[in-house]
Amino acid sequence: MESGVGVRECIEDYLGAIYRLRVAPESPLPLSALGEYFGFSPVSIHEMVQKLSQQGWIHYYPYRGVTLNARGEAVALALLRRHRLWERFLTDMLDVPWAEAHEIAGTLEHAAPESVTERLSALLGDPVSCPHGVPIPPSKRTYIDTCLRQAPLGARGRVTRIAPESGDILRDVQGWGLLPGRQITVVEKHEADIIVQVEERLVSIPVESANVIWIEVL
Ligand SMILES: [Zn+2]
């Protein structure tokens, strides 16, 4: 870790990742999930986690994983609010492609002070979700959804969100036409992929991707 701004960004990235990846606030997120997300070695993840725990941002339960404490949770929520508002600005005001907005917002999210973030929100009409369907804190989900991988055969539903987002998965999802709001039907389920009908098309979704596509079963 370097000093100054780099350290703050690095801490924010970790806290934001824990928030995005965790299943529930109180269930520890395994360090392997952070390793996979960042593409870092177990050793460097472990080192960073120990630092974050010593500095009072997270709880670390050896062999089980990490949870955010109240201080870490507040930083994560503020970061995700900035991230998702910038995504909206990029797609809605600048016509940046849907899949690219996430990556660009990953840089902008660290830069803006709170006063600018709030002006941005007002400018955008205080949106409640990012372009990928994910709620912008303090907004919360107003529906119950399930990830596509768990959806039963024959289920019909509406795509609610893509979470957690990554540039690659968003590009794939855009290609498949599974944008939030689209109606889909689960037509076939196999070990490696799930076939869904989107409008008149049938598309094959690899099961790993089906883990991050969420639908509200109708
Ligand atoms: Zn998003």
Image (cartoon, rainbow, N blue to C red):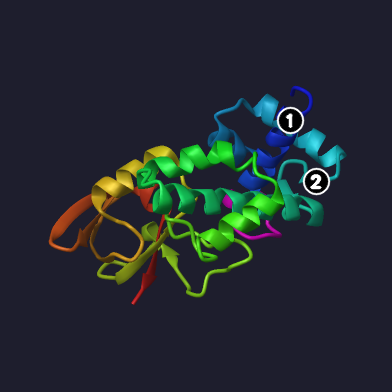
Residue at image x 29%, y 56%?
178
Give the camera-side residue of 124 and 26: 124
Residue at image x 49%, y 38%?
104
Decide: few, some or many residues near mark 2? Use Cα within 10 Å; few <14, some 14-19, many ≥20: many
Residue 194: name its quadrant.
bottom left
Q: Is residue 210 left or right of residue 196?
A: right
Q: Is residue 149 magenta?
A: no
In the image, what residue type sits under mark 2? Trp
Is the CB of the residue bearing disc 1 within 8 angstroms of ligand 1? no
Q: Is residue 27 magenta?
A: yes
In the image, what residue type sits under mark 1? Val
Residue 170: name its quadrant.
top left
The N terminus - image quarter: top right
Give the camera-side residue of 32 and 139: 139
Residue farthest toward the top in the current orientation of the protein: 2
In this figure, what is the number of numbered marks? 2
Decide: few, some or many residues near mark 1? Use Cα within 10 Å; few <14, some 14-19, many ≥20: few
Asked if residue 28 can be seen in this view, the reply is no
Residue 97 lies, with reference to residue 48, above or below; the image says below
Asked if residue 119 can be seen in this view, the reply is yes
Q: What residue span does the magenta drawing correspond to? A: 20-29
Residue 92 lies, with reference to residue 155, above or below; the image says above
Residue 202: x and y in percent read: 16, 56
Is the CB of the residue bearing disc 2 within 8 angstroms of ligand 1? no
Residue farthest toward the bottom in the current orientation of the protein: 218
In the picture, the disc for residue 57 is: 2
Q: Main secondary structure of the magenta part?
A: loop
Residue 49: x and y in percent read: 75, 36
Residue 40: x and y in percent read: 60, 27
Residue 146: x and y in percent read: 43, 65
Q: Which residue is mark 1?
A: 5
SS under mark 1: helix
